[in-house]
Image: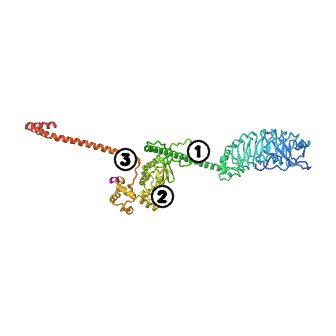
Amino acid sequence: MIPGKYRSVSGRAANNVNCGLHLVIQTSSLPEKNKVRFKKVEFKLNKDTSSFPGRLLQHDLERNYSSRQGDHINLVSSSLSSFPILQRSSEEKILYSDRLSLERQKLTVCPIINGEDHLRLLNFQHNFITRIQNISNLQKLISLDLYDNQIEEISGLSTLRCLRVLLLGKNRIKKISNLENLKSLDVLDLHGNQITKIENINHLCELRVLNLARNFLSHVDNLNGLDSLTELNLRHNQITFVRDVDNLPCLQHLFLSFNNISSFDSVSCLADSSSLSDITFDGNPIAQESWYKHTVLQNMMQLRQLDMKRITEEERRMASVLAKKEEEKKRESHKQSLLKEKRRLTINNVARQWDLQQQRVANIATNEDRKDSDSPQDPCQIDGSTLSAFPEETGPLDSGLNNALQGLSVIDTYLVEVDGDTLSLYGSGALESLDRNWSVQTAGMITTVSFTFIEFDEIVQVLPKLKIKFPNSLHLKFKETNLVMLQQFNALAQLRRIDQLTIDPQGNPVVNFTLWKYYVLFRLSHFSMQKINGTEVTQNDMIMAERLFGILAHVASSELPQYRLISILGDARKKQFQYLLESKGKKPGIINEENNDSKRLVGENTNRATLNYTTRDFYNEKLEEIKEKKKFCKTYIEDLVKEATEINMKNEALQKLWPQMFIELVRDAVIEIRNKNSYMKLCLQQITDQK
């Protein structure tokens, strides 16, 4: 079937089709001017079928009937009525008893048709009729043709319960209505009207052909109940989406040409239809897309024709291949979306944990500093800054992704991700990833390391690991790391190299200091940094940094005791330390670091090395260690004093007893050796006893 070809009551005879209605057009000459032209038709109703003609049921009833000549009838005016009265001879009534044609008679109203209750086909084509009336007595009518008139409302049909074909194309109808009693309707043609909505047809369970082409429809829905519909013509409307078509169990032909359909999603219900075999989308924006054909075929495998062209097996095969690729791509996209959303939720959770931690720290500090203050603290204000906002915006998610995320765990308090040459660490737990066995290729590829929601003191403890694990890391980023004082930058000196440094103002109050960049350049001058916070470092910046903080390094190295310098510098810098000792005591103006570069080893300047940073935890550990040492030393000294006191007391007692003891010793010796033989005998006995 080709849209635009009008095969209806005046169309071609369908002798080769098993149809219930067979129409043959005959013509005759017009003998009198005052007689209207009338088509002479032969009507045959097959006894072996109860259905209406298959050839009569087509998708596009848009062309006019052919010019016809037929029976002679008279329209007589009546003084008693404003309607003309139809009169036919008895011979004509007998010969053409079941059909009547009044096309092209310039009628403005329907004439009164008396004595024709047996009529089954009635034709009013190409007139100027504005209202359907005067046909309620034709209760045996099965076909009513009012094509190309000026009718504005469907009415006057409630008694025509046998009506099977209703042709109202090319009128002025704005609303589908008053069809409640036409439950046997088989063909309904409303093309070329002004209809904006499909309604009031759900009861037409026997309707097989519905033509709504060339109307003002913007969407398709409300088609439930049309269980017999096999053909639906919606060409030349303004349709943007289609619904309910999948609820039509018998629909085979759907024509959507020349509408405003721009995506397959807007007609996705078509994929659920198991009966559709012929569909058209030509003239829509979707038909211009490169993916159009294979998308339609892969979603509607039951189709036999698309845009009036038969679908080949090769096209089906290609559509199947592309469908598999599209499905894989869709799964990968869904996976990426899921991972992205999981990342967002994890970072959000890390940010929330960070804010709670900072709030607890702030509350503890406030309670210690203001024990007597009753003023409440703003829970959203921490160290003069608001709670951390989530770093990423998120848009609406599709239902499938939402369902997948329902079981997603969001208890993770850290995140480690590698994106190209950047390693991003969120949350203090992420620092443990530096202990994993990184592949040589991945570790060598990392040039940027980003820290977010991690205390800087915790970062300091893993800097030696960072230097070993990622030797090519040149760019460090810090966001929400509690960088609050210049001294903390000293810790970065233990890295291998830094070319760029980025300190985000969010969560790092140190950037509010005017001279923080100059201090970084001074303390880390041995790295020869190129950028700080995205700004190129110039030679003037280096000179200014040296002028501002050069004296600080000299004072720090000059005033420290020797044992402290040794503990800071270590054995690896004995030559530097020796040079430092030789230069001690000289006036600051005499020491010029720029002129003594040749006297130092390549690397960090010795004076600057005395500017180091001790983390709070390490400092607290040292305090505990110092306390233990003090306690031990105190106990040891007390024991020594106690022992010395006892020795002194014993010595004084000996001095007092010694004279008498000496006399007694001499006396005992004289008494023992007084009898020489007895004494020798006693000594021999003692020797014998000892053996």
**Amino acid bearing label 2:** Lys
Q: Tag 2 or tag 3, which sits nearer the N-term?
A: 2
Q: Would you place residue 41 above or below residue 520 in this image?
A: above
**Looking at the rendered structure, which numbered label has been put on residue 401?**
1
Eye-nearest disc, 2 or 1: 2
**Looking at the rendered structure, which numbered label has been put on residue 651?**
none
Q: Judge left or right: residue 508 versus residue 394.
A: left
Is label 3 in a helix, a strand or a loop? helix
Disc 3 from disc 2: Cα separation: 36 Å
Provide residue 376's location: percent of width, then percent of height: 49, 42
Residue linked to disc 3? 622
**Colour setting:** rainbow
Total marks placed? 3
Q: Of 615 and 68, which appears nearest the observer?
A: 615
Q: Tag 1 or tag 2, which sits nearer the N-term?
A: 1
Eye-nearest disc, 1 or 3: 3
Provide residue 275's location: percent of width, then percent of height: 70, 43
Q: Would you place residue 280 above or below residue 180 in this image?
A: below
**Amino acid bearing label 3:** Lys
Q: Is residue 19 visible?
A: no
Task: For label 2, count other residues whose C-alpha is less than 10 Å away and answer few (under 14), some (14-19) or many (20+).
Answer: some
Task: For label 1, count other residues whose C-alpha is less than 10 Å away and answer few (under 14), some (14-19) or many (20+).
Answer: some
Q: Main secondary structure of the magenta part?
A: helix
Task: For label 3, count other residues whose C-alpha is less than 10 Å away and answer few (under 14), some (14-19) or many (20+).
Answer: few
Provide residue 243's location: percent of width, then percent of height: 69, 44
Q: Tag 3 or tag 1, which sits nearer the N-term?
A: 1
Which residues, given as a range, are shown in magenta? Answer: 561-565
